[in-house]
Amino acid sequence: MILYSHGAGGHRSETTIVVQELASHGYVVVTVDHTYDGYSEFPDGRLTVPADELSFTPWDHAHDVQFVLDRIEDLAAGRNPDAGRRALPTGLGAALDLRRIGMFGWSKGATATALVMNQDRRVRAGLSFDGPMQSGPPPAGLDRPFMLMTAEFNRAAEPSVEQFWSQLRGWRLNVQADGALHGAYCDHQMLIPQLATIAGMSDEDLAAWVGTLDPGRAVRIQQAYPLAFFDLHLRHRRQRLLEGPSKAFPEVRSIP
């Protein structure tokens, strides 16, 4: 099972490409809307949007995720945490394997992934999509697998990311796609070029949004690398993709 935490002012659907790929390989994927730091809808139809007057930190995202983890434990135990007491799908709890939980996030959600792992050993493996890691590094004892897919918040440009990396004590890997900007590992990389065509955006303006990473190649990267990471660390299946340069992905570099 895998959880997702979105970026600041985002929403739980911003990595649908990744989520669909993971789900198609048998993972239960739980995506979290962070109320008032994103766009969300409650079961009764109430809508919330980002609230500029409120301050939300990656710690708030982390606390939301831990709340969701507790509710997932309720489901696995046969309890019904639904606020409206509505009937749940038959067999839902049995589909949840609490021994193999992973988490990933983009930007602020990536930092939250590290914070959750600092505090909660239920999460066995963490993946960052260009997280700034500015809420403090993990303790030296963090020995669980963690992978960085960096772009703008890379270790050379952002000291907090380098500090985070240096204190990881378990399996670790840092990969980066040439030409990638901050949203390269999200749906944005595919959607914004389509919007640019409709809006008449110039090539220069489009490059400022998405860099030079080809959208089609970005989709393949989003499908391949997260799946390989979680298959390796949650299912213990060898992944040659993560062992060195890949002819299938010549634009992706491993940062030692």
Image (cartoon, grey):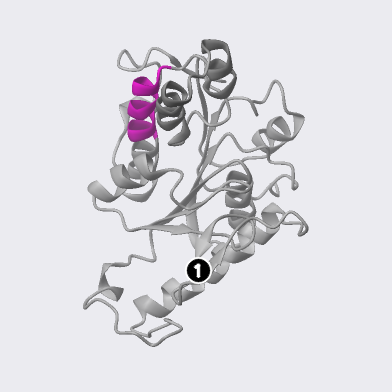
- Is residue 204 toward the left or the right of residue 14 in the image? right
71 relative to 199, above or below = below
Q: Is the N terminus in the top left, top right, bottom left or bottom right quadrant?
A: bottom left
Q: Which residues are magenta?
A: 214-225
Q: Quadrant of residue 166?
A: top right
169 relative to 190, above or below = below
Query: Which residue is rendered at x = 43% and y = 49% of the image?
Result: 13
Q: Amino acid at mark 1?
A: Val
Q: Which residue is mark 1?
A: 68
Find residue 181 and report its horizontal and vertical position in percent: 57, 24
Residue extending farthest bottom: 85
Query: Which residue is rendered at x = 42% and y = 25% of the image?
Result: 198
Q: Quadrant of residue 128?
A: top right
- Of the pair 123 and 140, the residue shown nearer to us: 123
Q: SS for tag 1?
A: helix
Find residue 119 and report its horizontal and vertical position in percent: 63, 61
* Residue 224 among those drawn in magenta: yes
* Residue 31 among those drawn in magenta: no
- Is residue 37 toward the left or the right of residue 203 in the image? right
Any part of residue 136 in sight? yes
Any part of residue 236 in sight? no
Q: Quadrant of residue 132?
A: top right
